[in-house]
Amino acid sequence: MDIIYKKVNSSRVTISELMLPSHTNFSGKIHGGYILMLMDQIAFAAASKYSGTYCVTASVDTVDFLNPIEVGELVTMKASVNYVGNSSMVVGIRVTSENIQTGKIKHCNSSYFTMVAKDANGKNVSVPHLILANDDEVRRFCKAVIRINQKKEHLKHSQTFDYTSPQALEELSKYNIKLDL
């Protein structure tokens, strides 16, 4: 079987949406949950476009809300596949908002969604290998590899860490807690 390769460009998706009062939280800013829903949609679109299959969200890495989004701003999300495994893809998403009256643009969020390609029966399927065509694509791929390896190390450490050891309990004295075991 021949290996299929695709360029990062074949996964690129951009969406823009005007933020309405119905998208706000209790403080009058755009609700983070609404932005996450849009991010999940664009991650799905980028991964499905790239893989040619239905995709599901496996995980969402660090979501930092950097700047609030106001009613009336135009939110733009750009997504592309940054990394591919066998059936998984890491989709990078950048969220900006624009005040359409002043033209001021704010970087509001960046995140990474791990998406998995599925067949009609819900089984994982292979995705095309990735062609990296410029320095930015190489940088994004390498950063994804670093995040994946850090995640694996963290998981390994958390599975072997003894939370009840005297050293671990002593370490907790640095925090705003009182042990009452």
Image: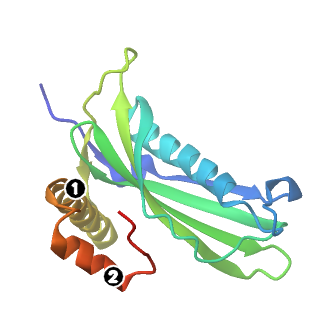
Crowding at mark 1 (Cα within 10 Å: few <14, some 14-19, many 20+): few
Pick whichever of labels 1 and 2 is earlier in the sequence.
1
Q: Nearer the viewer, residue 132 or 29?
A: 29
In this rendering, position of residue 22 left or right of residue 120:
right
Amino acid type at circle 1 is: Leu
Q: Residue at x 43, y 54 (%)?
A: 80
- Separation of disc 1 and disc 2 at Cα? 24 Å
Callout count: 2
The residue beneath circle 1 is: 155
Is disc 1 in contact with disc 2, using a CB cutoff of under 8 Å?
Answer: no
Question: Measuring 26% from the left and 38% from the top, which residue is drawn there?
Answer: 128
Residue 70 picture location, percent across and down = 79, 71
Q: Closer to the camera, 27 or 131?
A: 27
Q: Residue 117, relative to residue 80: is it above or below? A: above
Q: Give the structural element (helix, strand or loop) at label 2.
A: helix
Q: Quadrant of residue 19?
A: bottom right
According to the picture, the residue beneath numbered tag 2 turns out to be 173
Task: Give the crowd class for mark 2: few <14, some 14-19, many >=20 residues within 10 Å.
Answer: few
Task: Give the numbered dot on residue 109.
Answer: none
The N terminus is located in which quarter?
Answer: top left
Query: Residue most toward the top?
Result: 121
Q: Which is more toward the observer, 61 or 7?
A: 61
